[in-house]
Amino acid sequence: MRFEDLVAEKNDTLTPSDIKLVNVLLTDPTIGSFMPAQTVAARAGVHPSTASRLARKLGFETYRAMREALEFEQDASARVRKRIESAGGRSLLESVVAGEMLALSRLMAQVSQEQIAAATHGLRRAARIIVIGESHAGSLAQLFARRLKRSGYLASGLAHADWEAADELISLTRKDLVFGMIFRHESPGVERALALAAERGAGTVLLTDRSPAPPAQVSIIARRGEPGEFHSLTVPMAICNTLVLELSRVDRGRSMAALAQLEDIRLSFENAGAPGKRA
């Protein structure tokens, strides 16, 4: 539910101080998505504790959780503008690289080896893997599925939760696994695919930057950058690469054999099309 809808739903419980704070947040949501509670409260002319109380009234555990929700509501122009402004005296390339390095450096504190091992175990034992994501998550879903195929796993990547997803999910069994990706916005289609997998007894893994996350047997939650800024796929791509490498380490040569066979097949196509090789 959007922030303004939450406010409307809880309007009867809000004090005059709450309303002052809400007015500041609704006038410029960008402020609330990255400024600390004290700064926002000062702009509204209320006590800093008002921010925490408002967050709890609206159903958030902390003001930080409410700020993250506001961040997800920011449009692309606001996030790009903040990225450009944060460059300061640096070039945009330096700023982008620094942001990506910072996001990656925080990854170890958010994702444990136990989570990687659990996700790897699910992928390894699955007879079939369906990787699904919508919007920009769909691009990574297809890339990850392709890498799994090259490693000898029966995988398909879906960038839309529509009839194409229905075609793949109709034959889902308890031996299969659905690997969902949800970044930034809610994704009802991916959530439905995960729920259907659970109903069929299939395995479920979710890679997301949203907290709290939709239910899955294994959830890997990692932020993709600073609140309110333009976020890339660097962090989730690093996690996907780690999972592929972890599979190669533990699947007793399955991945390595498939990759070697892939190279042989690729060379056979190259040789078939080379001059002097045609029949």
Image (cartoon, rainbow, N blue to C red):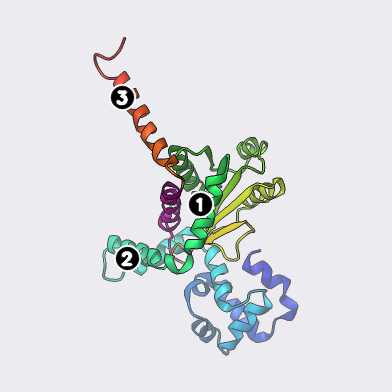
Disc 1 and disc 2: Cα gap in Å?
30 Å
Q: Which quarter shows the N terminus?
A: bottom right
Kindly report the secondary structure that dominates the magenta region of the rendered protein. helix
- Neighbour class for label 1 at 10 Å: few (<14), some, many (≥20)? many
Specify the farthest residue to the left: 276
Please report contact status of discs 3 and 2: CB closer than 8 Å, yes or no: no
| Residue mark closest to the camera, 1 vs 3 | 1
Earlier-in-chain disc, 1 versus 2? 2
Residue 108 colored in magenta in the image: no
Question: Residue 21 in the image: x percent, y percent?
Answer: 59, 81
Residue at coordinates 26% horizontally, 64% vertically from top-left?
91
The residue labelled by disc 2 is 98
| Residue mark closest to the camera, 1 vs 2 | 1
The residue labelled by disc 1 is 120
Taking the image as drawn, is residue 32 in sight?
yes
Residue at coordinates 53% horizontally, 54% vertically from top-left?
119
Q: In this rendered view, identify the residue nearer to me: 166 or 78.
A: 166
Vertical arrangement, residue 106 with respect to residue 127, above or below: below
Q: Amino acid at mark 3?
A: Glu
Taking the image as drawn, is residue 134 in sight?
no
What's the mark number on residue 180? none
Q: Which residues are magenta?
A: 229-250
Q: Amino acid at mark 2?
A: Ala
Q: Report whether 237 appears left or right of 273.
A: right
The residue labelled by disc 3 is 270
Residue 232 colored in magenta in the image: yes
